[in-house]
Image (spheres, grey):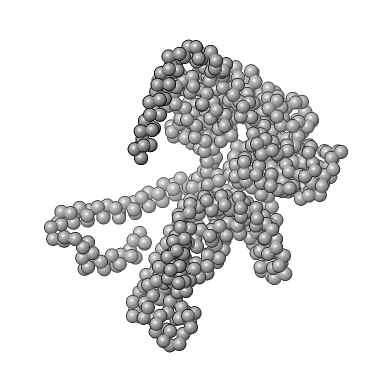
Amino acid sequence: MAIDTRPAPAPAAPPPAPLAGGPNPPGRISDRVLFVLAIVGGGLVLVILALIAVSMISKGWPAVRSQGLDYFTSDVWDPAHGVFGTLAFTFGTVVISAIALLFAVPLSVGIALFITEVAPRSLRRHIIYVVDLLAAVPSVVYGLWGIAVLAPALPGFYTYVHDIVAPIPVLGTVLDGDPIVGKSFMTAALILALMVTPIITSITRETFATVPQSQKDAAYALGATRWEMIRAAVFPHSRSGMVSAVLLGLGRAIGETIAVALVIGSNAQITAKMFSGGDALPSVIANEFGEATGTQRSALIGMGVMIFFITLTIGIIARTVLNRSARRAEGSL
Amino acid sequence: MTRIVSRSRLLVAGLAVSGLIVAGCGGSSSNKSSSSDSSTSKAPQLAAATLAGSGSTFQQPFNELAIQEFQKGQPKVTVTYGGGGSGKGQTDLKGNLVQWAGSDTPIKPADAAGYKPVFYFPTVAAPITVSYNLSGVGKLQLSADTLSKIFQRQIVKWDDPAIKAENSGVSLPSTAITVVHRSDSSGTTANFSDFLQKAAPSTWKLGSDKTIDWPAGTQSGNGNPGVAQVIKSTNGAVGYVDFSDAKQAGLSFASIKNSAGSFVAPSLDSASAALASATVNTNLTYDPINAPGADAYPITSPTYVIVYQSQTGAVGNALKGWLDFLLGPGQDLAQQVDFTKLPQSILSKAQAQVQQIKVS
């Protein structure tokens, strides 16, 4: 409900402009049909969303009832003894998504800047085409590539990295494994980074392209170098677009299932060592749902509810950030 | 486009003509076909019906082969099998989405409430291997106790005294042990852990289920082929893999100490010995895990087809025909896909149970 009220002011704007373009006056009946159709369509989205939430919560509830608060706060997932704690999977989901963004955001912003500000015009269209193509690759392809190529090759690289950073206090622990393995938190994060990069790149590029040439010229006129121009003109203008790009990428990272399930290693554990095997909410569901009955089945459905709400929250945050910065931008003009 | 269409039309016409010819001289040509074909053609022709099935992926290779052969004799009956896991098979049966479910385990008593009365039909069985990859070691013997300690990470080197004691004469390297388990929920995991729980109750602490809370530092693979792949590519690895996938991947198997005290290698014969010595319950479920008998391989996995006791009309008759086939001519197909057929003692009971299905 909360999502619906926020963007409400926005649709108020279009009506004055005759956007429909074509013949306006004779459309009394067709207008009414369109009105009803739009109401039904818009309402249906909310109804479906609510029905999904209700049915999933009711099917997942038995797990919460049998496990109590431990369902959320325990890291022990032991179907053999009827213990279902999901904290280790929530931890895995959060950690791999965060690391993925850590890699993907600077890379995506760099690519977007290169396309809009640096690359020669003739090259631009080809790069855009390739990046968009990457976004369309099915996730299972990334997963298979990860399991067949990346995971076997990485332990050597991980060991090498670990040996270098071992003496450094925090990095020495984070970049370590118990033992160092190819199917790990880090591998899953790398695959995710690869998957969200095209999404974040596409949206940031679109935003960068809307920066008015006059503002850029003004920055140059004040004697700014290219980097100073980007900092003074491009970034402030595109902040909200960049934030929503990152949040959309995050949404995809959190829900990604197959690619992660194939490379994360399936160990229910909470550890600071990112080169060891872990597990994430969606991959546990994918791995165990087919064979699960009784409480385990409800526990898995409950995890689906958790993902549902995490992505919903991220969506709401994204909207809020967007609206706020849009308002701020209006105020500054 | 048009050229393709006309060509495929020609093909269809050609097939129809050849079909007529085959039908015309069917009497003479059927003599040449194999014995299993001739036995199915003796069975009465069943009316058109569709039998949907889903469930255990363990029995899937056998079911697929059996469906192929069954439909040669009963072209009007369509049988499908959708895999998806034993849990899915049970839920699908509960929701009346399928007429038969494949499952490696009986329905849990706690879940039984939602089902109409069911019959269990054991169909085939197969050993679960303990496969390993250890360069220079071609023969390995393990007891349940040692195996438990390996999978609980209490033994982490191959030259551990406990392993040495069971393998006199074999020179074991000090390679670190890599334990490989399933990343997905599986009946294979359930049967393997069930064996450890039965044969080493004081050592094995992880319990028995389709998903086990494995200790940290273990690795995983998706499905039997996934586990086989990790073992094959890791020196020092050990894991549990079903017989046919382990064979296909060319892995080495350990011999496992059975309840009679002898070390037995996994094979269709040793699995068959385990079936023969297992006690069969009145509902025809049976437990060949850690079965007595000097030649019995102790980690032998059973699998069942579950159907409702009362059926209706053509579907019911087709279902009976399908079960008759699985427990009759179908048994001879088992070996082709690395399953062992049922011993006569279980088979005759299962065949008798088919007749108890009520068709109204």
Residue sitting at the far right: B169
On screen, residue A119 above or below B335: below
On screen, residue B212 above or below B117: below
Is residue A82 visible from the viewing direction of this image? no
What is the x, y in percent for residue B211?
61, 43
Q: Residue at x 17, y 54 (%)?
A: A30
Nearest the viewer among B250 and B295 is B250
Image side of residue A230 versus residue B299, left or right: left
What is the x, y in percent for residue B121?
56, 24
Q: How many marks?
A: 0
Residue sitting at the far left: A26
Q: Residue at x 43, y 33 (%)?
A: B97
Q: Residue at x 52, y 50 (%)?
A: A140
Image side of residue A51 versus residue B297, left or right: left
Picture quadrant where residue B200 is located:
top right
Residue sitting at the far front: B3
Is residue B4 visible from the viewing direction of this image? yes
Q: Residue at x 60, y 57 (%)?
A: A187
Location of the C terminus of chain A by quadrant is bottom left
Nearest the viewer among B341 and B69 is B69
On screen, residue B21 above or below A136: above
Location of the N terminus of chain A by quadrant is bottom left
What is the x, y in percent for residue B173?
82, 47
Image side of residue B71 versus residue B327, left or right: left
